[in-house]
Protein backbone atom coordinates (compact mmCIF):
# COMPACT_ATOMS: atom_id res chain seq x y z
CA UNK A 1 0.00 0.00 0.00
CA UNK A 2 2.75 2.47 1.01
CA UNK A 3 4.65 2.03 -2.24
CA UNK A 4 1.51 2.57 -4.32
CA UNK A 5 0.55 5.61 -2.27
CA UNK A 6 4.03 7.09 -2.64
CA UNK A 7 3.85 6.61 -6.39
CA UNK A 8 0.41 8.26 -6.43
CA UNK A 9 1.63 11.29 -4.49
CA UNK A 10 4.59 11.63 -6.86
CA UNK A 11 2.13 11.83 -9.77
CA UNK A 12 -0.12 14.33 -7.96
CA UNK A 13 2.97 16.41 -7.17
CA UNK A 14 3.72 16.49 -10.91
CA UNK A 15 0.21 17.80 -11.52
CA UNK A 16 0.52 20.50 -8.86
CA UNK A 17 3.89 21.51 -10.30
CA UNK A 18 2.05 22.50 -13.47
CA UNK A 19 -0.18 24.90 -11.50
CA UNK A 20 -0.90 28.50 -12.51
CA UNK A 21 0.40 31.71 -10.91
CA UNK A 22 -1.72 31.10 -7.79
CA UNK A 23 -0.02 27.68 -7.44
CA UNK A 24 -3.23 25.73 -8.09
CA UNK A 25 -3.66 23.12 -10.84
CA UNK A 26 -7.07 21.91 -11.96
CA UNK A 27 -7.67 18.16 -11.87
CA UNK A 28 -10.53 15.67 -11.93
CA UNK A 29 -9.87 13.51 -8.85
CA UNK A 30 -12.15 10.64 -9.91
CA UNK A 31 -9.72 8.96 -12.35
CA UNK A 32 -6.86 9.36 -9.87
CA UNK A 33 -8.91 7.64 -7.16
CA UNK A 34 -9.57 4.86 -9.69
CA UNK A 35 -5.87 4.41 -10.48
CA UNK A 36 -4.77 4.14 -6.84
CA UNK A 37 -7.64 1.80 -5.88
CA UNK A 38 -6.93 -0.54 -8.81
CA UNK A 39 -3.18 -0.56 -8.19
CA UNK A 40 -3.69 -1.38 -4.50
CA UNK A 41 -6.17 -4.21 -5.11
CA UNK A 42 -3.99 -5.51 -7.98
CA UNK A 43 -1.07 -5.73 -5.54
CA UNK A 44 -3.24 -7.29 -2.82
CA UNK A 45 -5.12 -9.81 -4.94
CA UNK A 46 -2.53 -10.69 -7.61
CA UNK A 47 0.78 -9.54 -6.16
CA UNK A 48 1.42 -6.78 -8.71
CA UNK A 49 -0.14 -3.33 -9.11
CA UNK A 50 -1.89 -2.79 -12.45
CA UNK A 51 0.42 0.16 -13.15
CA UNK A 52 -2.44 2.64 -13.70
CA UNK A 53 -0.94 5.28 -11.39
CA UNK A 54 2.37 5.11 -13.23
CA UNK A 55 0.68 5.46 -16.62
CA UNK A 56 -1.88 7.98 -15.36
CA UNK A 57 -4.55 6.17 -17.33
CA UNK A 58 -7.06 3.34 -17.15
CA UNK A 59 -4.90 0.75 -18.85
CA UNK A 60 -2.98 -2.30 -17.81
CA UNK A 61 -0.93 -4.88 -19.60
CA UNK A 62 -1.40 -8.64 -19.61
CA UNK A 63 1.23 -10.86 -21.16
CA UNK A 64 -0.47 -13.53 -23.31
CA UNK A 65 0.90 -17.08 -23.66
CA UNK A 66 2.18 -16.30 -27.19
CA UNK A 67 4.26 -13.42 -25.73
CA UNK A 68 2.06 -10.66 -27.11
CA UNK A 69 0.79 -7.96 -24.75
CA UNK A 70 -2.91 -7.26 -24.27
CA UNK A 71 -3.82 -3.71 -23.16
CA UNK A 72 -7.01 -3.61 -21.10
CA UNK A 73 -9.13 -0.79 -19.64
CA UNK A 74 -9.75 -2.39 -16.25
CA UNK A 75 -11.98 0.27 -14.71
CA UNK A 76 -14.12 0.57 -17.83
CA UNK A 77 -14.55 -3.20 -18.03
CA UNK A 78 -15.58 -3.25 -14.39
CA UNK A 79 -18.11 -0.47 -14.86
CA UNK A 80 -19.68 -2.23 -17.83
CA UNK A 81 -19.82 -5.43 -15.87
CA UNK A 82 -21.44 -3.59 -12.96
CA UNK A 83 -24.08 -2.01 -15.17
CA UNK A 84 -25.07 -5.28 -16.82
CA UNK A 85 -24.96 -7.27 -13.56
CA UNK A 86 -27.18 -4.84 -11.69
CA UNK A 87 -29.67 -4.56 -14.59
CA UNK A 88 -29.91 -8.35 -14.92
CA UNK A 89 -30.07 -8.62 -11.13
CA UNK A 90 -33.18 -6.43 -11.13
CA UNK A 91 -34.67 -7.99 -14.27
CA UNK A 92 -33.54 -11.65 -14.14
CA UNK A 93 -36.06 -12.67 -16.81
CA UNK A 94 -33.82 -10.88 -19.37
CA UNK A 95 -30.86 -13.14 -18.62
CA UNK A 96 -31.39 -15.94 -21.20
CA UNK A 97 -31.48 -13.56 -24.16
CA UNK A 98 -29.56 -10.53 -22.81
CA UNK A 99 -26.69 -10.99 -25.26
CA UNK A 100 -29.10 -10.60 -28.20
CA UNK A 101 -30.63 -7.30 -26.98
CA UNK A 102 -29.84 -4.31 -29.24
CA UNK A 103 -28.60 -2.06 -26.39
CA UNK A 104 -24.76 -2.40 -26.41
CA UNK A 105 -24.84 -2.12 -22.58
CA UNK A 106 -25.73 -5.84 -22.60
CA UNK A 107 -23.36 -7.20 -25.26
CA UNK A 108 -20.43 -5.05 -24.06
CA UNK A 109 -21.20 -5.81 -20.40
CA UNK A 110 -21.30 -9.56 -21.01
CA UNK A 111 -18.07 -9.36 -23.02
CA UNK A 112 -16.52 -7.48 -20.06
CA UNK A 113 -17.37 -10.35 -17.74
CA UNK A 114 -15.43 -12.67 -20.09
CA UNK A 115 -12.48 -10.22 -20.26
CA UNK A 116 -12.30 -9.92 -16.48
CA UNK A 117 -12.39 -13.66 -16.11
CA UNK A 118 -9.56 -13.92 -18.64
CA UNK A 119 -7.40 -11.46 -16.65
CA UNK A 120 -7.89 -13.36 -13.39
CA UNK A 121 -7.37 -16.78 -15.03
CA UNK A 122 -4.10 -15.51 -16.54
CA UNK A 123 -2.86 -14.22 -13.15
CA UNK A 124 -3.67 -17.57 -11.51
CA UNK A 125 -2.03 -19.67 -14.21
CA UNK A 126 1.11 -17.45 -14.11
CA UNK A 127 1.28 -17.91 -10.36
CA UNK A 128 0.79 -21.68 -10.60
CA UNK A 129 3.66 -21.79 -13.11
CA UNK A 130 5.84 -19.78 -10.68
CA UNK A 131 4.94 -22.20 -7.91
CA UNK A 132 5.96 -25.16 -10.04
CA UNK A 133 9.35 -23.53 -10.61
CA UNK A 134 9.44 -22.76 -6.86
CA UNK A 135 9.83 -19.07 -7.63
CA UNK A 136 6.75 -18.04 -5.72
CA UNK A 137 7.55 -15.79 -2.74
CA UNK A 138 4.49 -13.54 -2.82
CA UNK A 139 2.62 -12.38 0.25
CA UNK A 140 -0.83 -11.53 -1.09
CA UNK A 141 -4.42 -12.76 -1.23
CA UNK A 142 -3.67 -15.04 -4.18
CA UNK A 143 -0.87 -16.76 -2.24
CA UNK A 144 -3.28 -17.36 0.67
CA UNK A 145 -5.97 -18.68 -1.68
CA UNK A 146 -3.48 -21.07 -3.25
CA UNK A 147 -2.60 -22.45 0.18
CA UNK A 148 -6.20 -22.69 1.39
CA UNK A 149 -8.26 -25.87 1.37
CA UNK A 150 -11.81 -26.36 0.16
CA UNK A 151 -14.49 -28.55 1.77
CA UNK A 152 -13.06 -31.99 2.62
CA UNK A 153 -9.55 -30.57 3.08
CA UNK A 154 -8.74 -30.67 -0.64
CA UNK A 155 -6.83 -27.82 -2.32
CA UNK A 156 -9.03 -25.47 -4.35
CA UNK A 157 -9.05 -26.00 -8.11
CA UNK A 158 -7.64 -23.27 -10.42
CA UNK A 159 -11.13 -22.20 -11.57
CA UNK A 160 -12.29 -21.80 -7.94
CA UNK A 161 -9.15 -19.79 -7.10
CA UNK A 162 -9.72 -17.67 -10.21
CA UNK A 163 -13.25 -16.78 -9.18
CA UNK A 164 -12.17 -16.04 -5.58
CA UNK A 165 -9.37 -13.72 -6.81
CA UNK A 166 -11.81 -12.12 -9.23
CA UNK A 167 -14.28 -11.50 -6.41
CA UNK A 168 -11.61 -9.57 -4.49
CA UNK A 169 -10.77 -7.55 -7.57
CA UNK A 170 -14.41 -6.72 -8.34
CA UNK A 171 -15.40 -6.05 -4.73
CA UNK A 172 -12.28 -4.15 -3.73
CA UNK A 173 -11.50 -1.80 -6.63
CA UNK A 174 -14.48 0.26 -7.75
CA UNK A 175 -15.90 0.40 -4.23
CA UNK A 176 -12.73 2.02 -2.85
CA UNK A 177 -12.23 4.38 -5.80
CA UNK A 178 -15.84 5.62 -5.70
CA UNK A 179 -15.92 5.94 -1.92
CA UNK A 180 -12.57 7.73 -1.58
CA UNK A 181 -13.47 10.27 -4.27
CA UNK A 182 -16.87 10.89 -2.68
CA UNK A 183 -15.38 11.35 0.81
CA UNK A 184 -12.96 13.97 -0.51
CA UNK A 185 -15.86 15.73 -2.23
CA UNK A 186 -18.02 15.69 0.91
CA UNK A 187 -15.22 16.98 3.16
CA UNK A 188 -14.67 19.88 0.78
CA UNK A 189 -18.42 20.47 0.35
CA UNK A 190 -18.83 20.47 4.14
CA UNK A 191 -16.12 23.13 4.45
CA UNK A 192 -17.66 25.13 1.59
CA UNK A 193 -21.09 25.08 3.29
CA UNK A 194 -19.78 25.94 6.78
CA UNK A 195 -16.32 27.50 6.43
CA UNK A 196 -13.88 26.77 9.24
CA UNK A 197 -15.81 23.78 10.62
CA UNK A 198 -14.09 20.88 8.87
CA UNK A 199 -10.68 21.53 7.34
CA UNK A 200 -8.97 23.33 10.27
CA UNK A 201 -9.91 20.43 12.57
CA UNK A 202 -8.78 17.80 10.05
CA UNK A 203 -5.51 19.63 9.36
CA UNK A 204 -4.77 20.02 13.05
CA UNK A 205 -5.31 16.32 13.69
CA UNK A 206 -3.24 15.21 10.68
CA UNK A 207 -0.40 17.69 11.30
CA UNK A 208 -0.06 16.48 14.89
CA UNK A 209 -0.14 12.78 13.96
CA UNK A 210 2.02 12.62 10.84
CA UNK A 211 5.70 13.43 10.97
CA UNK A 212 6.61 16.62 9.10
CA UNK A 213 9.05 14.83 6.77
CA UNK A 214 6.57 12.10 5.68
CA UNK A 215 5.16 12.40 2.14
CA UNK A 216 2.37 9.94 2.88
CA UNK A 217 0.39 8.90 5.94
CA UNK A 218 1.18 5.60 7.65
CA UNK A 219 -1.66 3.49 8.99
CA UNK A 220 -0.08 3.28 12.44
CA UNK A 221 -0.30 7.08 12.68
CA UNK A 222 -3.81 7.60 11.34
CA UNK A 223 -5.83 4.53 12.25
CA UNK A 224 -7.03 5.97 15.57
CA UNK A 225 -7.60 9.59 14.57
CA UNK A 226 -11.18 10.31 15.69
CA UNK A 227 -12.03 13.28 13.47
CA UNK A 228 -10.58 11.60 10.36
CA UNK A 229 -12.66 8.50 11.08
CA UNK A 230 -15.81 10.57 11.56
CA UNK A 231 -15.17 12.33 8.23
CA UNK A 232 -14.75 8.93 6.53
CA UNK A 233 -17.96 7.59 8.11
CA UNK A 234 -19.97 10.72 7.30
CA UNK A 235 -18.67 10.64 3.70
CA UNK A 236 -19.66 6.98 3.43
CA UNK A 237 -23.11 7.77 4.82
CA UNK A 238 -23.78 10.58 2.37
CA UNK A 239 -22.39 8.78 -0.66
CA UNK A 240 -23.59 5.21 0.12
CA UNK A 241 -21.45 3.32 -2.40
CA UNK A 242 -23.43 0.08 -2.22
CA UNK A 243 -26.56 2.17 -2.63
CA UNK A 244 -29.21 -0.29 -3.79
CA UNK A 245 -28.05 -3.25 -1.70
CA UNK A 246 -27.69 -6.80 -2.98
CA UNK A 247 -30.68 -9.15 -3.14
CA UNK A 248 -31.62 -11.51 -0.32
CA UNK A 249 -34.24 -14.27 -0.51
CA UNK A 250 -36.76 -14.83 2.28
CA UNK A 251 -36.15 -18.49 3.13
CA UNK A 252 -38.30 -18.81 6.28
CA UNK A 253 -41.39 -20.80 5.30
CA UNK A 254 -43.55 -18.45 7.38
CA UNK A 255 -41.97 -15.40 5.72
CA UNK A 256 -40.66 -12.39 7.66
CA UNK A 257 -42.28 -9.34 9.22
CA UNK A 258 -40.70 -5.90 9.05
CA UNK A 259 -42.36 -2.65 10.14
CA UNK A 260 -45.72 -4.42 10.25
CA UNK A 261 -45.37 -5.60 6.65
CA UNK A 262 -45.28 -9.32 5.88
CA UNK A 263 -42.88 -10.60 3.22
CA UNK A 264 -43.79 -14.20 2.27
CA UNK A 265 -41.37 -17.06 1.59
CA UNK A 266 -39.48 -16.55 -1.68
CA UNK A 267 -39.67 -12.72 -1.68
CA UNK A 268 -36.49 -11.01 -2.87
CA UNK A 269 -35.54 -8.17 -0.51
CA UNK A 270 -32.65 -5.77 -0.25
CA UNK A 271 -31.59 -3.07 2.18
CA UNK A 272 -30.88 0.01 0.05
CA UNK A 273 -28.23 1.81 2.08
CA UNK A 274 -28.70 5.13 0.24
CA UNK A 275 -32.35 5.28 1.32
CA UNK A 276 -31.55 4.30 4.91
CA UNK A 277 -28.61 6.74 5.09
CA UNK A 278 -30.83 9.60 3.86
CA UNK A 279 -33.86 9.00 6.03
CA UNK A 280 -34.58 12.18 8.02
CA UNK A 281 -36.59 10.13 10.54
CA UNK A 282 -33.33 8.41 11.49
CA UNK A 283 -30.70 11.10 10.95
CA UNK A 284 -32.62 14.32 11.62
CA UNK A 285 -33.50 17.31 9.46
CA UNK A 286 -29.84 18.01 8.59
CA UNK A 287 -29.64 14.56 6.94
CA UNK A 288 -28.17 16.02 3.71
CA UNK A 289 -25.48 18.05 5.48
CA UNK A 290 -21.89 16.83 5.97
CA UNK A 291 -21.70 16.75 9.75
CA UNK A 292 -18.98 14.37 11.00
CA UNK A 293 -19.90 15.12 14.62
CA UNK A 294 -23.12 13.16 14.26
CA UNK A 295 -20.78 10.15 14.62
CA UNK A 296 -19.51 11.31 18.04
CA UNK A 297 -20.38 8.50 20.47
CA UNK A 298 -22.41 10.91 22.61
CA UNK A 299 -24.55 12.01 19.61
CA UNK A 300 -25.13 8.67 17.89
CA UNK A 301 -28.47 7.01 18.67
CA UNK A 302 -28.82 3.22 18.68
CA UNK A 303 -31.11 3.51 15.64
CA UNK A 304 -28.43 5.43 13.74
CA UNK A 305 -25.80 2.84 14.73
CA UNK A 306 -27.94 0.10 13.23
CA UNK A 307 -28.90 2.16 10.17
CA UNK A 308 -25.30 2.97 9.25
CA UNK A 309 -24.47 0.06 6.94
CA UNK A 310 -21.91 1.01 4.28
CA UNK A 311 -20.47 -2.52 4.45
CA UNK A 312 -23.79 -4.29 5.17
CA UNK A 313 -24.38 -6.31 8.34
CA UNK A 314 -24.40 -10.00 9.22
CA UNK A 315 -22.60 -13.05 7.86
CA UNK A 316 -22.45 -11.78 4.25
CA UNK A 317 -21.18 -8.31 5.18
CA UNK A 318 -18.07 -7.00 3.44
CA UNK A 319 -15.09 -9.23 4.24
CA UNK A 320 -12.78 -6.46 3.02
CA UNK A 321 -14.08 -3.70 5.31
CA UNK A 322 -10.91 -3.47 7.39
CA UNK A 323 -8.79 -3.24 4.25
CA UNK A 324 -11.25 -0.66 2.87
CA UNK A 325 -11.09 1.47 6.02
CA UNK A 326 -7.30 1.29 5.95
CA UNK A 327 -7.21 2.42 2.30
CA UNK A 328 -9.75 5.19 2.83
CA UNK A 329 -7.96 6.54 5.93
CA UNK A 330 -4.60 6.52 4.17
CA UNK A 331 -5.89 8.15 0.97
CA UNK A 332 -7.88 10.87 2.77
CA UNK A 333 -5.16 11.59 5.35
CA UNK A 334 -2.41 11.75 2.73
CA UNK A 335 -4.42 14.06 0.45
CA UNK A 336 -5.51 16.57 3.09
CA UNK A 337 -2.16 16.67 4.80
CA UNK A 338 -0.16 17.26 1.63
CA UNK A 339 -2.47 19.39 -0.52
CA UNK A 340 -4.79 22.36 -0.34
CA UNK A 341 -7.95 22.10 -2.41
CA UNK A 342 -10.54 24.39 -3.91
CA UNK A 343 -13.72 22.51 -4.78
CA UNK A 344 -14.87 23.30 -8.32
CA UNK A 345 -17.57 20.61 -8.42
CA UNK A 346 -20.99 22.09 -7.53
CA UNK A 347 -22.74 18.76 -6.96
CA UNK A 348 -21.33 15.25 -7.12
CA UNK A 349 -23.25 13.63 -9.96
CA UNK A 350 -23.19 9.84 -9.86
CA UNK A 351 -24.14 6.87 -11.98
CA UNK A 352 -25.64 3.77 -10.49
CA UNK A 353 -24.29 0.37 -11.50
CA UNK A 354 -23.10 -2.32 -9.16
CA UNK A 355 -21.84 0.53 -6.98
CA UNK A 356 -22.58 4.25 -6.97
CA UNK A 357 -19.92 6.05 -8.96
CA UNK A 358 -19.11 9.78 -9.09
CA UNK A 359 -19.01 10.90 -12.72
CA UNK A 360 -16.26 13.45 -12.04
CA UNK A 361 -14.89 15.54 -9.20
CA UNK A 362 -13.12 18.67 -10.33
CA UNK A 363 -10.89 20.45 -7.82
CA UNK A 364 -8.00 22.88 -7.85
CA UNK A 365 -5.04 21.49 -5.94
CA UNK A 366 -1.70 22.82 -4.68
CA UNK A 367 1.00 21.59 -2.31
CA UNK A 368 0.26 22.41 1.32
CA UNK A 369 3.50 21.03 2.80
C1 LIG B 1 -15.36 1.40 0.62
C2 LIG B 1 -15.15 0.24 0.08
C3 LIG B 1 -16.11 -0.92 0.17
C4 LIG B 1 -17.46 -0.93 0.33
C5 LIG B 1 -18.40 0.27 0.48
C6 LIG B 1 -17.87 -2.33 0.34
C7 LIG B 1 -19.18 -2.75 0.51
C8 LIG B 1 -19.55 -4.08 0.53
C9 LIG B 1 -20.90 -4.54 0.81
C10 LIG B 1 -22.08 -3.64 1.12
C11 LIG B 1 -20.87 -5.89 0.73
C12 LIG B 1 -22.04 -6.83 1.01
C13 LIG B 1 -22.74 -7.15 -0.25
C14 LIG B 1 -23.94 -8.02 0.03
O1 LIG B 1 -24.93 -7.50 0.53
O2 LIG B 1 -23.88 -9.22 -0.26
C15 LIG B 1 -19.53 -6.30 0.39
C16 LIG B 1 -19.13 -7.61 0.19
C17 LIG B 1 -17.84 -7.99 -0.10
N1 LIG B 1 -16.73 -7.17 -0.11
FE1 LIG B 1 -16.74 -5.16 0.14
N2 LIG B 1 -16.77 -3.11 0.17
C18 LIG B 1 -15.66 -2.31 0.07
C19 LIG B 1 -14.35 -2.71 -0.08
C20 LIG B 1 -13.92 -4.01 -0.20
C21 LIG B 1 -12.54 -4.41 -0.33
C22 LIG B 1 -11.32 -3.47 -0.32
C23 LIG B 1 -12.54 -5.77 -0.49
C24 LIG B 1 -11.38 -6.74 -0.66
C25 LIG B 1 -10.16 -6.53 -0.25
C26 LIG B 1 -13.92 -6.22 -0.44
C27 LIG B 1 -14.33 -7.52 -0.56
C28 LIG B 1 -15.64 -7.95 -0.44
C29 LIG B 1 -16.07 -9.32 -0.66
C30 LIG B 1 -15.16 -10.48 -1.05
C31 LIG B 1 -17.45 -9.34 -0.43
C32 LIG B 1 -18.37 -10.56 -0.51
C33 LIG B 1 -18.51 -11.15 0.88
C34 LIG B 1 -19.44 -12.35 0.92
O3 LIG B 1 -20.40 -12.44 0.17
O4 LIG B 1 -19.19 -13.21 1.77
N3 LIG B 1 -14.73 -5.12 -0.25
N4 LIG B 1 -18.74 -5.17 0.30
Image (tube, rainbow, N blue to C red):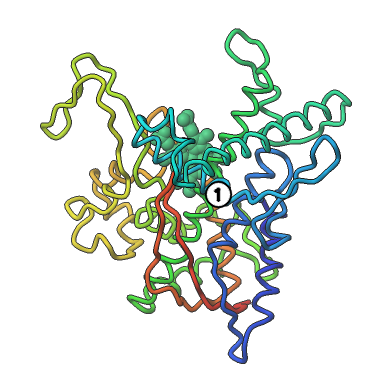
Q: Disc 1 marks which residue? A: 326
Tally of numbered tags: 1
Instruction: Residue 325: tell me if it is visible.
Output: no
Instruction: Residue 60: tell me if it is visible.
Output: yes
Q: Is residue 104 left or right of residue 230?
A: right
315 or 25, which is in the foreground?
Answer: 25
* Rendering coords of residue 80 (x, y %): 51, 46
Q: Residue at x 68, y 59 (%)?
A: 53
Residue 331: quadrant of the picture? bottom right
Q: Is residue 71 left or right of residue 361?
A: right
What crowding class fits label 1: few (fewer than 14 Cα within 10 Å), some (14-19), or many (20 or more)? some
291 lies above or below 114: below
Residue with the most extreme left position: 260
281 or 131, which is in the foreground?
Answer: 131
What is the secondary structure assignment of the residue under circle 1?
A: helix
Name the quadrant of the C terminus. Answer: bottom right
* Rendering coords of residue 155 (x, y %): 68, 15
Amino acid sequence: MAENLRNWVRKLDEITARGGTDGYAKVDLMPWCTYIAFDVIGALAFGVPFGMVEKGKDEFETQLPDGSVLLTKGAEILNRRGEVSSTLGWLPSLRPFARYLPDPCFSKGLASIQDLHGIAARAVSDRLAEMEKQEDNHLDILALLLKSKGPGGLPMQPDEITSEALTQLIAGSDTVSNTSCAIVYWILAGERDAPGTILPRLHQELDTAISSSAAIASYARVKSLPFLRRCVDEGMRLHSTSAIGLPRLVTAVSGVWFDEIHFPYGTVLSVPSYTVHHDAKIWGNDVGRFNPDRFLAKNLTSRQKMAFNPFSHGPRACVGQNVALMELSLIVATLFRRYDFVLEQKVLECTEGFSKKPVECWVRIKRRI
